Amino acid sequence: MKSYFISLFNYDRFANRQMADLTLKTGAAGKPLDIMAHLLVAQQTWLKRCMALPAPTTPLWPQWPAEEFVSIIDANHTAIIAYLETLQPQDFDRKITYKSSIGQFENTLSDILAHLVNHGTHHRAQIGQYLKMAGAELPASDYILYIRNLNQAL
């Protein structure tokens, strides 16, 4: 399961960088930037929860400039992969208790990791729609295409 999640988070970094690059290329402002910043801070928040550390004090919808996205994407990816590398097979079934703005909850680590990947996909789709409506041509970002290209490069 560890290698599977590492693969998914490697893809997540790739897809996040695609959207970050496109926001810079198009000079996007407003919602696409707000959503990307939210996606990135959510990664930081969930990672802290998984590690039983205090959540970041950054708001869930920060106002971050697009020029900072790639470095944040890379830092988040490095931290997530480093965390995943510490895990043993049984850790993925471990219950994580956390607080959100609406209460206290408990989920397995594997469910939280799956949520985190899906949360990114959801928000990248939103960003893509805003950019497409502004006239941008969206890159091919399907996971299966990423895997095919990765396998061809080996």
Image (spheres, grey):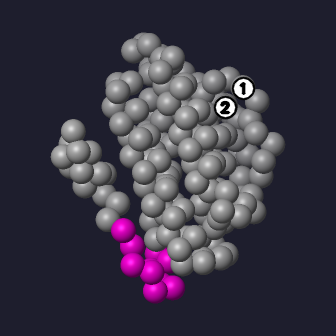
Residue placed furthest toward the right: 57
SS assignment at label 1: loop
Tell me if 128 is positioned left or right of 142 in this view: right
SS assignment at label 2: helix
Q: Where is residue 64 in the image (x, y as percent from the top left)?
A: 72, 60
Tell me where the magenta segment starts and ends, as one range. 129-139
| Residue under the point 41% across and 41% down | 10
For the residue carrying disc 2, how many other residues have a C-alpha within 10 Å: few (<14), some (14-19), or many (20+)?
Answer: some
| Residue under the point 59% across and 41% down | 76
**Observer-nearest residue: 68 or 51?**
68
- The earlier-in-sequence mark between 1 and 2 is 2
Q: Are marks 1 and 2 in contact (CB under 8 Å)?
A: yes
Amino acid carrying mark 1 in the image: Leu
Eyeballing the image, is 103 above or below 25?
above
Q: Where is residue 123 in the image (x, y as percent from the top left)?
A: 51, 60
Residue 4 is marked as: none
Q: Quadrant of the N terminus?
A: top left
| Residue under the point 43% across and 55% down | 15
Task: Please tell me in which quadrant of the rendered image residue 24 appears.
Answer: bottom right
Amino acid carrying mark 2 in the image: Lys
For the residue carrying disc 1, how many other residues have a C-alpha within 10 Å: few (<14), some (14-19), or many (20+)?
Answer: few
**Observer-nearest residue: 87 or 74?**
74
Q: Mark 2 points at which residue?
A: 48
Q: Position of residue 127 (x, y in %)?
A: 52, 69
Q: Please check the rendered image and state whether residue 124 is part of the magenta-colored stretch, yes or no.
A: no
Tell me if 77 is positioned left or right of 18 in this view: right
Residue 141: tell me if it is visible. Answer: yes
**Observer-nearest residue: 64 or 49?**
64
Q: Mark 1 points at which residue?
A: 53
